Image (cartoon, coloured by chain):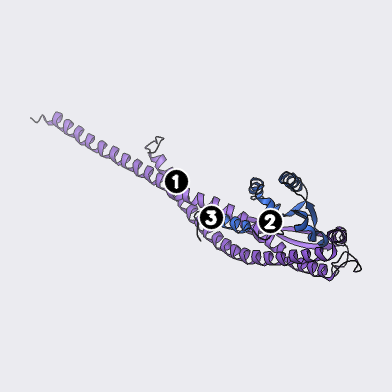
Protein backbone atom coordinates (compact mmCIF):
# COMPACT_ATOMS: atom_id res chain seq x y z
CA UNK A 1 0.00 0.00 0.00
CA UNK A 2 1.45 3.28 -1.06
CA UNK A 3 1.16 6.72 0.42
CA UNK A 4 1.28 10.26 -0.87
CA UNK A 5 3.65 12.86 0.50
CA UNK A 6 3.75 16.61 0.16
CA UNK A 7 6.93 18.54 0.83
CA UNK A 8 6.92 22.28 1.09
CA UNK A 9 7.02 25.29 3.32
CA UNK A 10 4.37 25.50 5.98
CA UNK A 11 2.08 28.04 4.37
CA UNK A 12 2.07 26.38 0.98
CA UNK A 13 1.17 22.86 1.96
CA UNK A 14 -0.69 23.12 5.25
CA UNK A 15 -4.02 22.56 3.59
CA UNK A 16 -3.05 19.15 2.26
CA UNK A 17 -2.81 17.91 5.78
CA UNK A 18 -6.55 18.17 6.11
CA UNK A 19 -6.99 15.95 3.06
CA UNK A 20 -5.12 13.18 4.82
CA UNK A 21 -1.87 13.36 2.88
CA UNK A 22 1.43 13.07 4.69
CA UNK A 23 2.76 16.58 4.83
CA UNK A 24 6.38 17.43 5.59
CA UNK A 25 7.20 21.00 6.44
CA UNK A 26 10.70 21.99 5.45
CA UNK A 27 12.18 25.45 5.35
CA UNK A 28 15.75 24.87 4.19
CA UNK A 29 17.20 23.23 1.11
CA UNK A 30 19.15 20.70 3.13
CA UNK A 31 16.12 19.65 5.09
CA UNK A 32 14.20 19.27 1.85
CA UNK A 33 16.94 17.10 0.38
CA UNK A 34 17.10 14.88 3.46
CA UNK A 35 13.33 14.54 3.56
CA UNK A 36 13.15 13.67 -0.11
CA UNK A 37 15.77 10.98 0.25
CA UNK A 38 14.01 9.52 3.23
CA UNK A 39 10.61 9.49 1.53
CA UNK A 40 11.97 7.80 -1.57
CA UNK A 41 13.09 4.90 0.60
CA UNK A 42 9.65 4.59 2.13
CA UNK A 43 6.36 3.63 0.55
CA UNK A 44 5.55 6.88 -1.14
CA UNK A 45 4.35 6.55 -4.70
CA UNK A 46 3.74 10.23 -5.27
CA UNK A 47 5.76 13.04 -3.77
CA UNK A 48 4.51 16.52 -4.39
CA UNK A 49 7.19 19.13 -4.08
CA UNK A 50 6.79 22.87 -4.26
CA UNK A 51 8.54 24.54 -7.16
CA UNK A 52 10.32 26.85 -4.76
CA UNK A 53 12.16 23.91 -3.24
CA UNK A 54 12.80 22.11 -6.49
CA UNK A 55 15.57 24.30 -7.83
CA UNK A 56 18.28 23.19 -5.40
CA UNK A 57 17.05 19.59 -5.65
CA UNK A 58 17.28 19.44 -9.42
CA UNK A 59 19.88 16.65 -9.43
CA UNK A 60 17.84 14.47 -7.10
CA UNK A 61 14.68 14.96 -9.10
CA UNK A 62 16.45 14.08 -12.31
CA UNK A 63 17.77 10.93 -10.69
CA UNK A 64 14.32 9.62 -9.84
CA UNK A 65 12.82 10.61 -13.16
CA UNK A 66 13.43 7.22 -14.73
CA UNK A 67 11.99 5.14 -11.91
CA UNK A 68 8.37 4.09 -12.05
CA UNK A 69 7.99 4.76 -8.31
CA UNK A 70 8.03 7.38 -6.85
CA UNK A 71 6.70 10.12 -9.05
CA UNK A 72 8.02 13.50 -7.98
CA UNK A 73 5.56 16.11 -9.11
CA UNK A 74 6.10 19.84 -8.84
CA UNK A 75 3.29 21.99 -7.57
CA UNK A 76 3.24 25.76 -7.28
CA UNK A 77 3.84 27.10 -3.78
CA UNK A 78 2.08 29.97 -2.15
CA UNK A 79 3.82 32.55 -4.31
CA UNK A 80 2.37 31.04 -7.46
CA UNK A 81 3.82 29.15 -10.36
CA UNK A 82 7.42 29.73 -11.37
CA UNK A 83 7.01 27.95 -14.67
CA UNK A 84 9.42 25.21 -13.66
CA UNK A 85 6.92 22.46 -14.33
CA UNK A 86 6.38 23.81 -17.81
CA UNK A 87 10.14 23.83 -18.33
CA UNK A 88 10.34 20.21 -17.18
CA UNK A 89 7.65 19.27 -19.65
CA UNK A 90 9.52 21.06 -22.38
CA UNK A 91 12.70 19.19 -21.56
CA UNK A 92 10.88 15.85 -21.63
CA UNK A 93 9.56 16.66 -25.09
CA UNK A 94 13.03 17.65 -26.16
CA UNK A 95 14.42 14.41 -24.86
CA UNK A 96 11.86 12.36 -26.73
CA UNK A 97 11.93 14.25 -29.99
CA UNK A 98 15.65 14.92 -29.95
CA UNK A 99 15.15 18.52 -30.89
CA UNK A 100 13.52 21.58 -29.46
CA UNK A 101 10.12 21.98 -31.05
CA UNK A 102 8.03 24.84 -29.85
CA UNK B 1 36.17 -1.64 -43.79
CA UNK B 2 36.01 0.63 -40.80
CA UNK B 3 38.39 -0.78 -38.27
CA UNK B 4 38.39 -4.54 -38.20
CA UNK B 5 39.33 -6.76 -41.09
CA UNK B 6 36.87 -9.31 -42.33
CA UNK B 7 37.48 -12.62 -44.03
CA UNK B 8 36.39 -12.57 -47.65
CA UNK B 9 34.89 -16.01 -47.54
CA UNK B 10 31.60 -17.38 -48.74
CA UNK B 11 30.67 -18.33 -45.19
CA UNK B 12 31.24 -14.83 -43.92
CA UNK B 13 29.17 -13.51 -46.79
CA UNK B 14 26.23 -15.71 -45.88
CA UNK B 15 26.53 -14.70 -42.27
CA UNK B 16 26.57 -11.00 -43.10
CA UNK B 17 23.61 -11.33 -45.42
CA UNK B 18 21.59 -12.96 -42.67
CA UNK B 19 22.65 -10.25 -40.32
CA UNK B 20 21.65 -7.51 -42.71
CA UNK B 21 18.23 -9.03 -43.08
CA UNK B 22 17.77 -9.09 -39.30
CA UNK B 23 19.03 -5.55 -38.97
CA UNK B 24 16.66 -4.23 -41.61
CA UNK B 25 13.74 -6.01 -40.03
CA UNK B 26 14.69 -4.80 -36.57
CA UNK B 27 15.06 -1.30 -37.89
CA UNK B 28 11.59 -1.32 -39.35
CA UNK B 29 10.06 -2.71 -36.18
CA UNK B 30 11.84 -0.24 -33.93
CA UNK B 31 10.88 2.59 -36.19
CA UNK B 32 7.24 1.59 -35.98
CA UNK B 33 7.56 1.34 -32.22
CA UNK B 34 9.10 4.77 -32.04
CA UNK B 35 6.40 6.32 -34.19
CA UNK B 36 3.63 4.81 -32.13
CA UNK B 37 5.26 5.83 -28.86
CA UNK B 38 5.68 9.31 -30.20
CA UNK B 39 2.00 9.50 -30.96
CA UNK B 40 1.09 8.36 -27.46
CA UNK B 41 3.65 10.67 -25.99
CA UNK B 42 2.30 13.74 -27.71
CA UNK B 43 -1.20 12.85 -26.53
CA UNK B 44 0.09 12.59 -23.00
CA UNK B 45 1.95 15.87 -23.27
CA UNK B 46 -1.21 17.55 -24.42
CA UNK B 47 -3.16 16.11 -21.51
CA UNK B 48 -0.39 17.08 -19.15
CA UNK B 49 -0.55 20.71 -20.29
CA UNK B 50 -4.27 20.90 -19.68
CA UNK B 51 -4.10 19.21 -16.28
CA UNK B 52 -1.14 21.25 -15.17
CA UNK B 53 -3.02 24.41 -15.93
CA UNK B 54 -6.08 23.20 -14.07
CA UNK B 55 -4.04 22.15 -11.03
CA UNK B 56 -2.11 25.38 -10.90
CA UNK B 57 -5.25 27.43 -11.06
CA UNK B 58 -6.96 25.27 -8.45
CA UNK B 59 -4.01 25.44 -6.09
CA UNK B 60 -3.74 29.15 -6.51
CA UNK B 61 -7.37 29.50 -5.57
CA UNK B 62 -6.93 27.21 -2.58
CA UNK B 63 -3.81 28.99 -1.42
CA UNK B 64 -5.59 32.30 -1.68
CA UNK B 65 -8.46 30.97 0.37
CA UNK B 66 -6.13 29.61 3.01
CA UNK B 67 -4.35 32.93 3.22
CA UNK B 68 -7.68 34.63 3.78
CA UNK B 69 -8.67 32.05 6.37
CA UNK B 70 -5.37 32.50 8.11
CA UNK B 71 -5.87 36.23 8.18
CA UNK B 72 -9.38 35.92 9.58
CA UNK B 73 -8.68 33.23 12.16
CA UNK B 74 -5.05 33.71 12.98
CA UNK B 75 -2.42 31.22 11.91
CA UNK B 76 -2.30 29.31 15.19
CA UNK B 77 -5.93 28.39 15.21
CA UNK B 78 -5.75 27.56 11.53
CA UNK B 79 -2.94 25.16 12.16
CA UNK B 80 -4.67 23.64 15.09
CA UNK B 81 -7.75 23.06 13.01
CA UNK B 82 -5.85 21.33 10.25
CA UNK B 83 -3.27 19.34 12.15
CA UNK B 84 -5.32 16.27 12.90
CA UNK B 85 -6.89 15.02 9.73
CA UNK B 86 -9.97 12.91 9.96
CA UNK B 87 -9.31 10.94 6.84
CA UNK B 88 -6.21 9.28 5.54
CA UNK B 89 -5.42 8.58 1.95
CA UNK B 90 -4.14 5.29 0.67
CA UNK B 91 -2.91 4.83 -2.80
CA UNK B 92 -3.08 1.81 -5.02
CA UNK B 93 -0.54 1.74 -7.78
CA UNK B 94 -1.06 -0.52 -10.73
CA UNK B 95 0.91 -0.51 -13.92
CA UNK B 96 -0.33 -0.09 -17.42
CA UNK B 97 1.67 -1.10 -20.43
CA UNK B 98 2.14 1.44 -23.19
CA UNK B 99 4.35 -0.03 -25.90
CA UNK B 100 6.30 -2.11 -23.37
CA UNK B 101 6.74 0.84 -21.03
CA UNK B 102 5.21 0.27 -17.63
CA UNK B 103 3.49 3.44 -16.57
CA UNK B 104 1.81 3.78 -13.19
CA UNK B 105 -1.86 4.23 -12.73
CA UNK B 106 -3.09 5.52 -9.41
CA UNK B 107 -6.19 4.70 -7.53
CA UNK B 108 -6.75 6.28 -4.17
CA UNK B 109 -8.91 5.41 -1.25
CA UNK B 110 -9.71 7.45 1.76
CA UNK B 111 -9.50 5.67 5.05
CA UNK B 112 -11.33 6.64 8.18
CA UNK B 113 -14.39 8.83 7.89
CA UNK B 114 -17.00 8.21 5.27
CA UNK B 115 -15.30 10.33 2.65
CA UNK B 116 -18.10 12.84 2.34
CA UNK B 117 -16.84 14.78 5.31
CA UNK B 118 -13.56 16.48 4.61
CA UNK B 119 -13.44 18.97 7.43
CA UNK B 120 -11.30 17.71 10.28
CA UNK B 121 -12.42 20.40 12.72
CA UNK B 122 -15.45 21.59 14.52
CA UNK B 123 -17.11 24.64 13.11
CA UNK B 124 -17.03 26.67 16.30
CA UNK B 125 -13.62 28.29 16.05
CA UNK B 126 -13.07 28.29 12.36
CA UNK B 127 -14.26 30.57 9.66
CA UNK B 128 -16.17 29.84 6.49
CA UNK B 129 -13.18 30.82 4.43
CA UNK B 130 -11.36 27.75 5.65
CA UNK B 131 -14.21 25.54 4.52
CA UNK B 132 -13.98 27.11 1.11
CA UNK B 133 -10.24 26.58 1.03
CA UNK B 134 -10.55 22.90 1.86
CA UNK B 135 -13.32 22.49 -0.64
CA UNK B 136 -11.07 23.96 -3.30
CA UNK B 137 -8.17 21.75 -2.28
CA UNK B 138 -10.32 18.67 -2.25
CA UNK B 139 -11.59 19.31 -5.73
CA UNK B 140 -8.14 19.99 -7.10
CA UNK B 141 -6.76 16.85 -5.50
CA UNK B 142 -8.25 14.49 -8.04
CA UNK B 143 -6.69 16.50 -10.80
CA UNK B 144 -3.40 16.40 -8.94
CA UNK B 145 -3.49 12.63 -8.86
CA UNK B 146 -4.20 12.46 -12.53
CA UNK B 147 -1.46 14.97 -13.14
CA UNK B 148 0.98 12.78 -11.24
CA UNK B 149 -0.01 9.81 -13.35
CA UNK B 150 0.25 11.66 -16.60
CA UNK B 151 3.49 13.38 -15.74
CA UNK B 152 5.19 10.18 -14.64
CA UNK B 153 3.98 8.43 -17.78
CA UNK B 154 5.39 11.27 -19.79
CA UNK B 155 8.80 11.01 -18.15
CA UNK B 156 8.98 7.26 -18.56
CA UNK B 157 7.84 7.40 -22.16
CA UNK B 158 10.33 10.13 -22.93
CA UNK B 159 13.11 7.95 -21.63
CA UNK B 160 11.97 4.95 -23.64
CA UNK B 161 11.52 7.00 -26.80
CA UNK B 162 15.00 8.38 -26.42
CA UNK B 163 16.39 4.86 -26.13
CA UNK B 164 14.43 3.61 -29.11
CA UNK B 165 15.39 6.62 -31.18
CA UNK B 166 19.06 5.96 -30.52
CA UNK B 167 18.66 2.34 -31.50
CA UNK B 168 16.86 3.23 -34.71
CA UNK B 169 19.57 5.69 -35.59
CA UNK B 170 22.35 3.28 -34.76
CA UNK B 171 20.80 0.66 -37.00
CA UNK B 172 20.00 3.07 -39.78
CA UNK B 173 23.24 5.00 -39.91
CA UNK B 174 25.86 2.58 -38.57
CA UNK B 175 24.90 -1.04 -38.51
CA UNK B 176 23.06 -1.36 -41.82
CA UNK B 177 25.45 0.68 -44.00
CA UNK B 178 28.45 -1.04 -42.52
CA UNK B 179 27.05 -4.48 -43.15
CA UNK B 180 26.15 -3.51 -46.69
CA UNK B 181 29.65 -2.23 -47.26
CA UNK B 182 31.13 -5.43 -45.91
CA UNK B 183 28.89 -7.55 -48.11
CA UNK B 184 29.92 -5.54 -51.14
CA UNK B 185 33.57 -5.87 -50.20
CA UNK B 186 33.35 -9.63 -49.81
CA UNK B 187 31.44 -10.21 -53.00
CA UNK B 188 33.86 -8.04 -54.95
CA UNK B 189 36.78 -9.88 -53.44
CA UNK B 190 35.20 -13.22 -54.27
CA UNK B 191 34.49 -12.09 -57.84
CA UNK B 192 38.04 -10.89 -58.13
CA UNK B 193 39.33 -14.27 -56.96
CA UNK B 194 37.04 -15.95 -59.44
CA UNK B 195 38.39 -13.83 -62.30
CA UNK B 196 41.95 -14.44 -61.14
CA UNK B 197 41.25 -18.13 -61.19
CA UNK B 198 39.78 -18.01 -64.70
CA UNK B 199 42.73 -16.15 -66.17
CA UNK B 200 45.13 -18.50 -64.46
CA UNK B 201 43.31 -21.48 -65.91
CA UNK B 202 43.37 -19.92 -69.37
CA UNK B 203 47.06 -19.29 -69.04
CA UNK B 204 47.70 -22.87 -67.88
CA UNK B 205 45.62 -24.19 -70.77
CA UNK B 206 47.71 -22.16 -73.21
CA UNK B 207 50.90 -23.53 -71.72
CA UNK B 208 49.64 -27.12 -71.76
CA UNK B 209 48.52 -26.80 -75.39
CA UNK B 210 51.87 -25.35 -76.35
CA UNK B 211 53.69 -28.24 -74.69
CA UNK B 212 51.44 -30.83 -76.30
CA UNK B 213 51.54 -29.57 -79.91
CA UNK B 214 54.89 -27.92 -79.85
CA UNK B 215 53.53 -24.83 -81.47
CA UNK B 216 56.08 -22.19 -82.02
Label 1 Cα crowd, 10 Å radius (few <14 / some 14-19 / many 20+): some
Q: Are marks 1 and 2 on the same chain?
A: no
> Residue B158, which numbered label?
none
In the rendered structure, the answer to whether residue B124 lies left or right of residue A25 reads right
Residue designated by label 2: A73
Q: Nearer the viewer, residue B173 or B201?
A: B173
Which residue does the image show at 56% across and 59% down from the upper left? B37
Of callouts 3 and 2, the N-terminal one: 2
Q: Where in the figure is residue B40, as x and y percent of width and height?
A: 58, 62
Tag 1 subunit: B
Residue designated by label 3: A94
Q: Are marks 3 and 1 on the same chain?
A: no
Q: Are marks 3 and 2 on the same chain?
A: yes
In the rendered structure, the answer to whether residue A101 lies left or right of residue A30 reads left
Q: Is residue B178 above or below residue A10?
A: above
Label 3 Cα crowd, 10 Å radius (few <14 / some 14-19 / many 20+): some
Q: Quadrant of residue A49?
A: bottom right
Q: Nearer the viewer, residue B179 or A89?
A: A89
In the rendered structure, the answer to whether residue B98 lies left or right of residue B176 reads right
Q: Nearer the viewer, residue B176 or A39?
A: A39
Q: Colour of chain B?
A: purple
Q: CA distance from mark 3 to mark 1?
A: 25 Å
Amino acid sequence: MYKIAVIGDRDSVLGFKALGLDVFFVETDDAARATLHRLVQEDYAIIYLTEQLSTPLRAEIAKYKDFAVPAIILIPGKTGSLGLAEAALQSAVERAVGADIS
Amino acid sequence: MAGKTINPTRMELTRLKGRLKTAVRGHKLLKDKRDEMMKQFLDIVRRNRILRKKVEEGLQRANGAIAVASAVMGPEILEQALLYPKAGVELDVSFRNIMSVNVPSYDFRTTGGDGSEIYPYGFAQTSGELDAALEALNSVFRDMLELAEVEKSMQLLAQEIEKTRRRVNALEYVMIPETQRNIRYISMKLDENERGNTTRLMKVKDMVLQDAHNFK
